[in-house]
Structure formats: structure tokens, C-alpha cells
């Protein structure tokens, strides 16, 4: 039993580290990072992971080793000790410092993503002049772009279902709203998630770095159709974005001839 | 110092488990019929004896464990093979050819969470073991308020009935997640489960709250006032400390949940508007719609208010789920390593620190909720710092094992398993606490992995360990060691196969609570991994047969043992197995702490708290 | 003593495993669903007797199976006439003009292919890398999966064989679902609301408001068709693509264009099946007999009705006018004019859907209840135009269709013939402006996400 137990315990760090190391080969790891702050979040994740992995390996191996070494069969009598003040101090102080380091390295990125001070003030889209309003409802996503007057909430607004088209490499600010229950706007490739709260208008910003179309997922339970609530964020070049807006407008005022 | 001042009986123990066969008749005190004979009903059903009440909690918890486990299997089946006929349940869904419906799936995970937390783990840890162990471990004849204690268990019955009735109402049971975020849960048209299932859910939880509250008052009073002579606070076993701290958590956090669930109940039944904003249009009905005879509702509420109130209870609740488990593990590790617990005081302080910090970290569930992000910063720092006392505990457990004389019997294996997997659950928590990382991993499977490592691999392993360890005290017999070891090995392997892989699903961005994620391009390739997890989960579930058979077999045919089969120090082992009414047959005087194993003062490797040297 | 309980446990575990009957190595089988007759066919008369003799019900069920197949194998019957014409109704859309059925233009075909390339980009990359075994095709494409498996079986020794690789890619790029593929996708995504037969009576349906569409009448609300005609493919495709806002019908654009076109094919089959069923019941009730000829005749009549739908399309030829203060004001006048628009009588003077004629008193309880029911028997209220929710679409042309043609299956009538297009556009502008009343933009003052 001693051998089985120690091997089992030893298998945890070995297989644990192994599966994480090979996860990317199976594509069971991060989707590609396509927003300006996505690499930062990945880096912070990895930073925590490496610190955590060290502790994980050390403690798990120690556990397996102690179970192997100090079994009743090999030891006649346990060591009689009630602890060590010095050791307690060491393993309080070191983790405390490490944890504070972790906490403080996180702050800047969070402030950049979510704080009002982090929002872009230059460029085409700002909090005062968002690119669009994204409406969530059971169970779909709709995007409202301002019409010719450049102001949202007027009669010439253009509405697009399912898709949210934004220009690449440009700071995008949009307003997130919900018509019924709580939803959450999540694009894995952008590493960005924000709940849509009914009764609130929540500004969100990101800057997509690669053209393409990305799944927009609802990340907060919103009813039986939660799994159906999908959308798409399509990132296009600035020219294509202007063309899209023109096309959207043409389609909006189409006379029904396809 | 001269050892052996009292002659010790010759001890015959099993070489590897340390088990000591029966010494004299079990339950000697049963023969003391000084007081009136109790009938079956008053002895086993309407009992005021803390041990019987503990067993009542134990058995009802185990029954609900099976129910919650079956739901988990159904969830896993759907995730591996979406929309295939559900084994065993297909008769319920003739219209879809046996595949479950999406609203049934939402109900499944809602009720899996609810049942596992409120009807399994909390009743098992604080209800079953709290009741059984506290008086025995502090040397009290019973709880401070035995009738309140009985009422505490019977207050669970309305909760049991209501939670089961909810399955049979129109629209099915609550389906807003165990967190029940409004407006999904408050507006009837928002989800089938919000029609009336949610009302049953809320009423049931209110009863659970009443029960836990009565338990908590009792535990605190008993521990503070009824300790045996010489049993100072700092001589109490860590199990008692864990239960005391959990009771304080319940005392201060539960009223908030009870108030919040009553507010939500009012929102639902008399259309108050605590949590419902104005101008919602849900499923074509507005809360203030005059259509279909709906009364005009006051709205203007705030959905985030519920999240604050709910998590103000439910985050400390997470520690109610784990702090007693830490206590049990500490005790069991010390007994079977034959060593004093390493750093008793740091262990107590760190449990208290976990509980104290637990009150100021609830916001980490809300980093992406639309709460003021500045708050997120302070919640992050507080949350990350909770890892510190957790780390101290892990190091102390390792310190306890170091230099020990470890008996690898079943309770010890499960306790070591707890430590091994609590490390994983604790460390992965740092990711969730870190705000920017949490923006990405919030509500993904990495969260699911994290809390299952803490609550299943942690608390549930501690419960298994405690059952194996205190079974002799409960029934006067031990559980079968061979079966126990088989049970441990399989459970340990399959638990890790099931939950470890969920980290990878989470890193890949897979959302929880999605019935069929594979229609998304980003998730389509995750199906094989989910199949693997499902198969592991099935194996884990089937493996529990070894526990069930062992439990019931040993109840009748297990090896009989005497008072102290593990040669442990704490007071409960001074009582007969099983203890009779009043627990102890001789007056107790406590001389020392409960962890004097391998003490040089005596020849044996243990020194009970009551033995004078 | 130590062995006995172990044996018990092993036996119990074995029993439990066997009891689950789970072949853990392979995927469980798909559920089996069956088409049933609609409740109107199997209805009872006042005496409690079936309206149709049971034998006749069986006859109708058999005929429907002959014409439309089963959920596991849905297909249109290829009549003798079609065999002669070399027309295959089961490939009505994709097979271009070779056999006379092509309904897609070259552009549309190109768009479908391009969308397949996007949808299968992960699989195509795996094929490119020669990792055929890693390709996981969605579970809702049974025919494609079997074709893929057959293709893999013929894999040459050289995994990078260009011809093999090309064929494998073509299989995905040229993918267009068979009716069987679409029926499986329908089962996974649509059935729990719309029901096996498309009767709008799936298990989730009771909890929805409005109710899911019942296809069996061939009546679809949001089309561009006049005279309550059956819809064009474009109309059905638009619903799948855009969703119906304000209802539980989401946009299904996460599926590829080919898959959505396939769903349209399958919805057409279900709708035709329901129409033929109704037809047969009526024929029997009128003539007391049901011959093979009558069945085939009904089938071709329904087929023709769908085929000729395009003729009923409402075409507005000019440019859509932009709203102006004047047109909105004129729309308001028309809205309130009892002779032409008469909109206010249902939609209310302020457009809140609370007009006087929309409600009635319950004869017994005296409660205020909706006055109208739709064709499916559900109580229906006029749209509250101030919510900004337009189920058929918020585009001016969509609102134009609603006003011009009315809404099929509901009390919303077509515009009276005296109304000119200009009048209708004025109404469109007025209706559109109702939900966009001037309001203070909240965003710049929002405190919800600020750090103070």
C-alpha cells in the first residue's frame, strides 16, 4: 500500500504537469490571442501558473516522499515535535511576499481594461462617441450602429443581427445593454468578458489585432436557450469597415430586391 | 521523565492499519438502564441525542449525495454526447426520442449544485459530524440545547420535501443556476424553472437556513460553555475548532442569505421590485405589462444587489464547506501519523484567518458583473491573501507527516488524498482571484475544476475519511479495510481524471452551463476531451459501490472494536463505542492537548487527554 | 471475512455497469423520433368518436410516409412525372439547372462554398497537415460523416497524396446537407420548440411566448408575400439568419449557409407534409374516400403552391424614402385616420398596443382579455410600437411589408387599396419614430463602470 499510495501521489504532479505541457498540442489550451491586452492576460496567467507550478510540484512531491519514507513499517516511533516557530515564520513570509507580488502585478492590466481611466480618449471611438450599442436579449445579440447623424438612439440607427463588425487595430468602445436578463459578452480570442446588466449601459473597450471572425459567446446563464446565444465579432480592415457601414446602410434602406 | 506511570494494557494492533480489536463488550453503557427505556420512535426518530441526530444528518446527506451524483452523471452524459437518449430518463422525453430538453439541462445543473451544497456537504460536515463529534470531543454529555438540536434536524424536513416537490411542478425545478441571479429567477416568464420551481427552491433554502442557524447557535454555545474540566480552548482538537469557526461563519453570514431569499420570494409572489429593473421585456411580457391580467409591478430594482447579498453569504459558505474538513483532516493525519499536529496554534489562527478574510472577498465572484471595477482591486488583494493561511495549513500538514510513523489505512489515505487535491484546488484559486485573468476565465470550466477540487476532492474526501475514521465510534464496528483501500485508489484516480482535465477545457475558454457547446467553432474540438471526462466521471460514480457495500456490510458484520481502536488521544475515544446516552461513563479531567502522539513521557505512542501521567 | 464483501461489491459494480448498458467505447445511438398525425386529424367529434375512422387515419399516415419519408429518412416522393422530367425534388436547390430544379444563382453557390471554407477551416487545416484522423465532423451531419468515413477507408499509403487530399477537401468545401443531415440538425436545434412534425408543439413550447411557429398550416407570419401566400426560400432563410427579435427564436447564423439552406429545405418538407395532411383530411371529409390519385394530386398541388410562391412576392421598385419631419407627421395623421390607416383602434393612440378594439371583457369573469386570436388559436395582442421590437425586422422595407400585406395568420390586415405607397412609407416613418422618441443619452453619465 505504501508504494501504491506514494506512486499515486507522485503521479499527480507528474501527470498534472505533463497534461498542461502537452495541452497545446491537442489544441486544449488558449485560443489565439487577438486583442491588444490578450497577450498581457496570457502572460499574467502564465506568470501565476509558473509560481503555482513550483509550489504544486514541491508540495506534491514532498507529500509522496513523506508517505513513502515515514510509513509505519520503516519507522518505530514518530518524531515528537509540536512545530517550529522559525519554519512557520518562513512559510508565512515567503508566500505572503509572493502573493502580494502576484496581486500587484495584476493591477495595471485590470485598470487598463476596465477602469474609466483606461478607456481610449483618442481616435474615432470614445466613451462619448461609441462605435455601437450591443444589445443582448434571450437569446441573441444585436448591434446598433449610429446612422448618418452619428448619434445612437435616433430613428436612423442601423441594426445588425448576430454580427458585430469592427475595424482592426483601432480602439473600439461600445455600449453593452440587455433587454431582459443578465447576459455576458465574451470573445475568447480577445480574452474579454463583460456582463450585460439590464437597466445599465456599460461601456466596454478593446482593440482587435487580427482580421477574422470570432465567436461571441454568452457567458452568463440566461435561460434555457443559453447555449444557443451566439454571435460573431468580425474584425475587418478600416476600408472594409467603411464599406460594411455603407453596405449595411444600403441593405437597411433596401427595397427588398435581392 | 519516567515513562509509564500507569500500567498500560498489552496492546495488540494490526501491523499496517493500527487497528485494535475489541476489548470487552461494545457499548458497555447501554446496559445502564438507570433512566426509562426509550421506544423506537423517540430513540431513533424524534431523538434529542446528539449522536442520533448526527446519524440522521449522515443518512439523509448520503441519500441526497446519490441524487446529486446521478444529476452530475446526467450532466456529464449530455456534455459528452449532446442530445442523445438519456439512459434511464428517456421515458420522460417521448417528444424528443429520449434526448433531454435544454430547460431540463439547466434544471439539472441548478439542482446538482443546490443539492450538493445545501443538502449534502453542509449537512454532512456540520450536521452529521458537527453533532456527533462536538460533545464527544469536548467531553460534554450532549449539546447545550438538545431540543433545539432535534428541531434543527426536523427543520431540514420541510426543506427536503420542498426541494423534492419542486421537481414535479409545471416547468420543472429552479433553473437559474444555484446562484439564482435575478431577473432570470425573479421573472416568471424568464425560464420554465422560474414559473414556480424557483419559489420552492427559495422556500426550501430558507428552511435550510433556519436549520443551520439553530445548529450554529447550538455548536457555539456547547463549545463555549460545556467543555470538560481542563479542556481549555487551546486543548481542543482542530475538528472542533473547524466546526466552531464554521458555526461563526453561519451565524454571521446566513441571516443575509435568508433575508435575500425572502426578498427574492417577495419579488416573485407579491411583485416587489428589489432585484428587477424597470422596462424589461422578458419572453414578450414586461413586468409592468397589463396583458394577461398581470398586476402592475413596482420595478426599479437592482440585479447586482442580489449578487452582493448572495455572495456575502455564499462565499463564506464555501469556507463552511471546507474549514471543518480541514479540521477533520488535521486530526486524522495526526492520529495515523502518530505525531503531534505540526503547529497547532498556526493551524487555529489560519482557520480563523480564512474565515475572517472570507467575509471580505465576496466581490471576486463579480469581477465582470458590472460592479465598479475599483472594488475589484480590493477584493482581489483580499482574495489572493486567503491563499496565505491555506498555504500555512498545507505546510503544517506536510510537517505533521514528516518524521511520522504513518499507518496507511483507509481514513489516512483519504486524508492524504484531501491534502494532495486541496493543494490543486487552492492553487488554482489564485487564477480566479487575479482580476485580469478572471476576466477571461470567469464562468469557464477552470472555475468548475477549481471548486470541484475544493468541494468534491476536498470536502468530500474529508467526509469519506471522517466516516472511515469515526465509524467505529458511531457503530462499534470498523469498516472493511480492503474494500476501503480499493475505494480510495479508484476514487482518487477517477477524481483526478475527471476534474484535472477541466482546467484545460477552461483554458480553452469553454463556458459552464452550456448544454451543447459544440456548435461554436471555438469549442467544437473539445468534445473528445469531454468524453474522456464523462467516462472518468461514470467510473468514479460506479466505484462508489465499494463504499456503499462496505458501509452497509460493516454495519452488521464489520469487526467489533472497543473504545479506542486507533489508539487516539482525543476525548471521544474515552467513551464506549458506540457511546450510550450521556456519552461518558466516568468523570473526565483533561490534562493536555489532543496531539501528544509518540510522546517520550509514555511507552506507548499515544497519550490520551484524560490520562494522568 | 475480508473477501466476502469484496465479492459483493464487485458483483454490484458489474451489475450496475451492465444495467447502464453503456457501450462506453462508442457513441450512443441517435434517438428515434416518429412523425405523428396532427391533433386536428386525430380529433374526436362531439360524441367522442374519431372524426376520421382509424383505418383512414392509418391510410393518411401511410400516404404521408410514402410522400415525405420518416424523420430518419426524410425525402420527397419522386413521382413518375418527375422521373420522366429527370427532376429530383430531393436536390431542389443545389444541383443547379442540370435537372431543372436549381434555385440558387451562381453567386449564392459561391457564397455557400466560401462559407463552408470558413466553417470547416479547422478541419481543412487538419487535412492540409495530413491529420485526417483528428478531423471531427459535427454530429448533425450523419450523411457527411459516413461519406467521410468511406473516403478515409480508401486512404492511400501516402497521407499527403494530392488527389486524395483534394477529394477530402472537396467533400467539405462542396458540402450541402441532404434532407437527412438537415433532419438531424433540426432534431438537435429546433425540435424541442417546433416539434417533430413542425407543429410548434415541442416540449419547450409551452413556456414560450409567443408560441413557436406551427409549419403545418403553411402559414408564416414574416414574409414579403401578399395574399397569405406560402413563403419564398429567401423569407424562411432570413428568419433563420436574422432570428425573430423579441421572441425565443435566435439567429442561427453560427451554422454555415449550407446548413441553414438545408434547414429551409427541411422546414419546407415539414410544412408541405402538414398541408398535404390537412388537404387529405378535408378530401376525405368531403368525398368519404381517399384514392391514390387524390393523394398524389394533393401532393402536386401543394408542391406547385410552394413552387409558385415567388409570383406572390411584393416588390417595391422605387428607392426607399428617408424619413422627414413632414412624412412622420403625415404618418401620424394616417395612423389616427379611421378611414385609411385606422391603426390606432388596435395599436392605441400612442402606439402602445392598447387600442380599444384589442381588448374585450371576459363574458363570465369580466376581466380584460385580448380580443383576438391568431390562426393557431393563441391570444394575441397588437404590437406595442414603443418598445422598438419589430419581429419581422426593423428595416423600413420590413415594416412596409407588414403594413402593405398585413401579417399572415394574425388579425393585422393588409393595407386598404386606397393607400398609396407614399402613404405606407409615411406610416413606416411614423411607426419607426415611435420607439426612438428623443431621449437623453445615458452613456456619458453612466456610473455603472466608472472608477470614482
Image: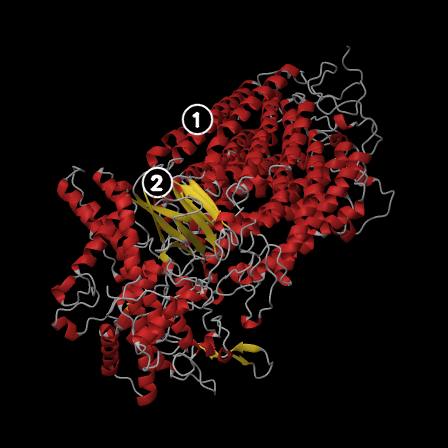
Callout 2: chain: A
A258 in relation to A210, above or below? below
Pick the quarter of the image with the C terminus of chain A.
bottom left
- Residue occupying the far right of the picture: B34
* Image position of A161 (left or right of B540): left
Q: Which residue is mark 1?
A: A14
**Where on the picture, by quarter, is residue C238?**
bottom left
- Which residue sits at x=50%, y=62%? B281
Please tell me which residue lies in front, C274 or B575. Answer: C274
Is the residue at mark 1 from the same chain as the one at mark 2? yes
Label 1: how many Cα within 10 Å (few below 14, some 14–19, many 20+): few
Q: Is residue B529 something one can see in this rendering?
A: no
Disc 1 or 2, which lies upstream in sequence?
Answer: 1
**Where on the picture, by quarter, is residue C302?**
bottom left
* Image position of B256 (left or right of C402): right
Please tell me which residue lies in front, C346 or B146. Answer: C346
The dot on residue A35 is none
Residue B523, given in percent of the width and then of the height, sits at: 37, 45
Residue C387, given in percent of the width and then of the height, sits at: 47, 64
User: What element does badge 1 sit on?
Assistant: helix
Separation of marks 1 and 2 at Cα, in angstroms: 44 Å
- Residue occupying the far top of the picture: B1
Please tell me which residue lies in front, C414 or B380. Answer: C414
Label 2: how many Cα within 10 Å (few below 14, some 14–19, many 20+): some
Residue C200, given in percent of the width and then of the height, sits at: 40, 69
The dot on residue A170 is 2
Q: Count every numbered label the image shows and give the total.
A: 2
Is the Cβ of the residue at disc 1 closer than 8 Å to that at disc 2? no
Judged by depth in the image, the label closer to the viewer, 1 or 2, is 2
Callout 1: chain: A
- Which residue sits at x=61%, y=32%? B411
Amino acid at each position: 500500500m505504501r508504494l501504491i499510495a506514494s506512486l499515486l501521489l507522485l503521479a499527480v504532479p507528474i501527470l498534472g504537469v505533463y497534461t498542461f505541457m502537452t495541452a497545446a498540442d491537442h489544441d486544449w489550451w488558449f485560443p489565439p490571442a487577438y486583442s491588444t491586452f490578450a497577450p498581457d492576460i496570457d502572460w499574467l496567467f502564465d506568470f501565476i501558473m509558473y509560481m503555482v507550478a513550483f509550489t504544486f510540484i514541491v508540495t506534491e512531491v514532498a507529500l509522496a516522499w513523506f508517505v513513502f519514507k515515514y510509513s509505519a513499517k520503516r519507522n518505530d516511533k514518530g518524531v515528537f515535535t509540536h512545530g517550529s516557530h522559525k519554519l512557520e515564520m518562513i512559510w508565512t513570509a515567503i508566500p505572503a511576499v509572493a502573493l502580494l507580488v502576484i496581486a500587484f502585478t495584476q493591477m495595471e492590466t485590470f485598470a487598463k481594461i476596465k477602469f474609466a481611466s483606461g478607456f481610449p480618449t483618442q481616435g474615432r471611438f470614445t466613451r462619448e462617441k461609441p462605435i455601437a450599442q450591443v444589445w443582448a436579449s434571450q437569446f441573441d445579440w444585436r448591434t446598433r450602429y449610429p446612422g448618418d447623424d452619428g448619434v445612437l438612439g435616433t430613428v436612423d440607427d442601423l441594426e445588425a443581427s448576430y454580427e458585430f463588425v469592427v475595424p482592426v487595430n483601432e480602439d473600439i468602445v461600445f455600449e453593452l445593454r440587455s433587454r431582459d436578463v443578465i447576459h455576458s459578452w465574451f470573445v475568447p480570442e480577445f480574452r474579454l468578458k463583460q456582463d450585460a446588466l439590464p437597466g445599465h449601459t456599460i461601456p466596454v473597450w478593446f482593440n482587435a489585432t487580427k482580421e477574422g471572425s470570432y465567436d461571441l459567446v454568452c457567458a452568463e446563464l440566461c435561460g434555457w436557450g443559453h447555449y444557443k446565444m451566439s454571435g460573431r465579432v468580425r474584425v475587418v480592415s478600416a476600408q472594409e469597415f467603411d464599406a460594411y457601414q455603407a453596405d449595411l446602410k444600403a441593405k437597411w434602406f433596401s427595397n427588398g430586391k435581392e | 521523565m519516567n515513562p509509564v506511570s500507569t500500567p498500560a494494557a498489552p496492546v495488540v494492533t494490526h501491523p499496517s492499519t493500527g487497528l485494535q480489536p475489541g476489548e470487552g463488550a461494545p457499548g458497555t453503557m447501554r446496559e445502564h438502564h438507570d433512566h426509562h427505556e426509550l421506544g423506537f420512535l423517540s430513540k431513533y426518530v424524534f431523538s434529542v441525542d446528539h449522536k442520533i441526530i448526527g446519524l440522521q444528518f449522515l443518512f439523509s446527506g448520503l441519500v441526497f449525495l446519490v441524487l446529486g451524483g446521478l444529476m452530475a452523471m446526467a450532466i456529464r452524459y449530455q456534455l459528452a454526447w449532446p442530445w442523445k437518449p438519456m439512459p434511464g430518463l428517456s421515458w420522460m422525453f417521448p417528444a424528443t426520442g429520449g434526448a433531454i430538453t435544454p430547460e431540463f439541462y439547466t434544471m439539472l445543473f441548478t439542482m446538482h449544485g443546490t443539492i450538493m451544497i445545501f443538502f449534502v456537504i453542509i449537512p454532512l460536515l456540520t450536521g452529521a459530524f458537527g453533532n456527533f463529534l462536538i460533545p464527544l470531543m469536548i467531553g460534554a454529555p450532549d449539546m447545550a440545547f438538545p431540543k433545539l438540536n432535534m428541531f434543527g434536524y426536523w427543520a431540514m424536513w420541510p426543506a427536503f420535501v420542498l426541494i423534492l416537490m419542486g421537481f414535479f411542478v409545471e416547468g420543472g425545478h429552479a433553473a437559474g443556476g444555484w446562484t439564482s441571479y435575478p431577473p432570470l429567477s425573479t421573472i416568471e416568464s424568464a425560464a420554465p424553472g422560474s414559473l414556480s420551481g424557483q419559489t420552492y427552491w427559495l422556500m426550501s433554502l430558507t428552511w435550510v437556513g433556519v436549520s443551520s442557524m439553530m445548529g450554529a447557535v447550538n455548536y457555539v454555545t456547547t463549545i463555549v460553555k460545556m467543555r470538560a474540566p481542563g479542556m481549555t480552548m487551546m486543548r481542543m482538537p482542530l475538528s472542533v475548532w473547524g466546526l466552531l469557526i464554521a458555526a461563526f461563519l453561519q451565524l454571521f453570514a446566513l441571516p443575509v442569505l435568508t433575508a435575500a431569499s425572502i426578498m427574492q420570494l417577495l419579488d416573485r409572489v407579491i411583485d416587489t421590485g428589489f432585484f428587477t429593473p424597470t422596462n424589461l421585456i422578458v419572453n414578450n411580457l414586461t413586468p409592468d405589462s397589463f396583458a394577461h391580467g398581470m398586476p402592475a409591478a413596482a420595478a426599479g430594482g437592482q440585479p447586482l444587489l442580489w449578487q452582493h447579498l448572495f455572495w456575502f453569504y455564499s462565499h463564506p459558505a464555501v469556507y463552511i464547506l471546507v474549514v471543518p474538513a480541514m479540521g477533520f483532516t488535521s486530526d486524522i493525519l495526526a492520529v495515523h501519523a502518530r505525531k503531534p499536529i505540526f503547529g497547532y496554534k498556526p493551524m487555529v489562527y489560519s482557520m480563523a484567518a480564512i474565515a475572517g478574510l472570507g467575509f471580505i472577498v465576496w466581490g471576486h465572484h463579480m469581477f465582470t458583473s458590472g460592479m465598479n471595477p475599483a472594488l475589484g482591486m480590493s477584493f482581489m488583494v483580499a482574495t489572493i491573501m486567503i491563499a496565505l493561511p491555506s498555504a500555512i495549513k498545507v505546510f503544517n500538514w506536510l510537517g505533521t507527516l514528516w518524521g511520522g510513523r504513518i499507518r496507511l489505512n483507509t481514513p489516512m489515505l483519504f486524508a492524504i488524498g484531501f491534502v494532495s487535491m486541496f493543494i490543486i484546488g487552492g492553487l488554482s484559486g489564485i487564477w480566479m482571484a487575479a482580476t485580469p485573468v478572471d476576466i477571461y476565465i470567469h464562468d469557464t470550466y477552470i472555475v468548475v475544476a477549481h471548486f470541484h477540487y475544493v468541494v468534491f476532492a476536498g470536502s468530500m474526501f474529508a467526509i469519506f475519511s471522517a466516516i472511515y475514521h469515526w465509524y467505529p465510534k458511531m457503530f462499534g464496528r470498523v469498516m472493511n479495510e480492503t474494500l476501503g483501500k480499493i475505494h480510495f485508489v479508484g476514487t482518487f484516480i477517477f477524481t483526478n481524471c475527471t476534474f484535472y482535465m477541466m482546467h484545460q477545457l477552461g483554458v480553452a475558454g469553454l463556458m459552464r452551463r452550456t448544454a451543447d457547446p459544440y456548435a461554436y467553432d471555438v469549442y467544437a474540438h473539445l468534445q473528445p476531451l469531454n468524453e474522456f471526462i464523462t467516462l472518468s466521471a461514470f467510473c468514479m460514480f460506479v466505484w462508489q459501490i465499494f463504499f456503499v457495500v462496505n458501509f452497509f456490510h460493516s454495519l452488521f458484520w464489520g469487526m467489533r472494536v472497543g473504545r479506542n481502536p486507533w489508539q487516539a488521544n482525543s476525548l471521544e475515544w474515552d467513551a464506549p463505542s458506540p457511546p450510550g446516552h450521556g456519552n461518558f461513563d466516568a468523570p473526565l479531567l483533561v490534562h493536555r492537548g489532543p496531539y501528544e502522539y509518540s510522546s517520550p513521557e509514555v511507552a506507548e505512542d499515544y497519550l490520551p487527554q484524560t490520562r494522568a501521567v | 471475512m475480508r473477501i466476502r464483501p469484496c465479492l459483493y461489491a464487485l458483483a454490484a459494480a458489474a451489475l450496475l455497469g451492465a444495467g447502464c448498458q453503456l457501450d462506453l467505447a462508442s457513441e450512443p445511438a441517435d434517438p428515434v423520433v416518429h412523425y405523428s398525425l396532427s391533433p386536428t386529424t386525430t380529433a374526436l367529434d362531439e360524441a367522442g368518436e374519431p372524426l376520421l375512422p382509424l383505418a383512414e387515419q392509418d391510410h393518411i399516415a401511410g400516404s404521408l410516409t410514402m410522400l415525405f419519408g420518416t424523420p430518419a429518412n426524410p425525402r420527397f416522393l419522386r413521382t413518375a412525372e418527375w422521373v420522366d422530367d429527370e427532376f429530383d425534388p430531393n436536390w431542389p436547390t443545389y444541383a443547379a439547372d442540370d435537372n431543372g430544379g436549381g434555385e440558387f444563382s451562381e453567386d449564392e453557390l459561391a457564397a455557400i462554398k466560401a462559407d463552408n471554407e470558413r466553417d470547416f477551416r479547422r478541419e481543412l487545416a487538419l487535412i492540409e497537415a495530413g491529420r485526417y484522423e483528428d478531423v471531427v465532423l459535427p454530429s448533425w451531419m450523419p450523411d457527411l460523416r459516413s461519406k467521410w468515413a468511406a473516403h478515409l477507408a480508401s486512404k492511400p499509403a501516402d497521407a499527403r497524396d494530392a488527389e486524395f487530399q483534394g477529394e477530402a477537401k472537396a467533400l467539405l468545401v462542396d458540402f450541402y446537407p441532404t434532407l437527412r443531415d438537415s433532419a438531424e440538425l433540426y432534431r438537435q436545434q429546433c425540435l424541442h420548440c417546433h416539434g417533430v412534425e413542425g407543429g410548434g408543439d415541442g416540449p419547450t413550447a409551452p413556456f414560450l411566448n409567443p408560441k413557436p411557429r406551427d409549419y403545418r398550416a403553411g402559414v408564416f407570419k414574416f414574409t414579403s408575400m401578399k395574399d397569405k401566400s406560402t413563403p419564398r426560400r429567401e423569407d424562411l432563410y432570413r428568419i433563420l439568419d436574422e432570428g425573430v427579435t423579441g421572441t425565443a427564436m435566435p439567429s442561427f447564423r453560427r451554422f454555415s449557409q449550407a446548413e441553414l439552406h438545408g434547414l429551409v429545405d427541411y422546414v419546407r418538407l415539414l410544412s408541405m407534409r402538414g398541408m398535404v395532411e390537412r388537404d387529405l383530411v378535408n378530401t376525405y371529409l368531403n368525398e368519404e374516400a381517399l384514392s391514390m390519385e387524390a393523394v398524389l394530386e394533393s401532393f402536386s398541388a401543394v408542391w406547385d403552391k410552394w413552387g409558385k410562391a415567388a409570383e406572390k412576392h411584393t416588390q417595391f421598385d422605387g428607392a426607399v424614402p428617408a424619413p422627414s419631419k413632414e412624412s412622420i407627421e403625415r404618418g401620424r395623421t394616417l395612423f389616427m385616420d379611421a378611414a385609411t390607416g385606422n391603426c390606432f383602434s388596435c395599436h392605441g393612440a400612442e402606439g402602445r398596443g392598447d387600442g380599444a378594439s384589442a381588448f374585450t371583457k371576459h363574458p363570465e369573469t369580466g376581466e380584460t382579455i385580448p380580443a383576438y386570436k391568431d390562426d393557431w388559436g393563441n391570444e394575441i395582442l397588437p404590437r406595442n410600437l414603443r418598445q422598438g421590437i419589430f419581429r419581422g425586422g426593423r428595416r423600413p422595407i420590413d415594416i412596409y411589408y407588414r403594413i402593405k400585406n398585413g401579417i399572415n395568420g394574425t388579425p393585422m390586415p393588409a393595407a386598404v387599396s386606397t393607400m398609396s405607397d407614399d402613404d405606407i412609407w409615411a406610416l413606416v416613418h411614423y411607426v419607426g419614430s415611435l420607439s426612438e422618441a428623443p431621449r437623453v443619452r445615458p452613456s456619458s453619465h453612466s456610473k455603472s463602470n466608472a472608477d470614482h
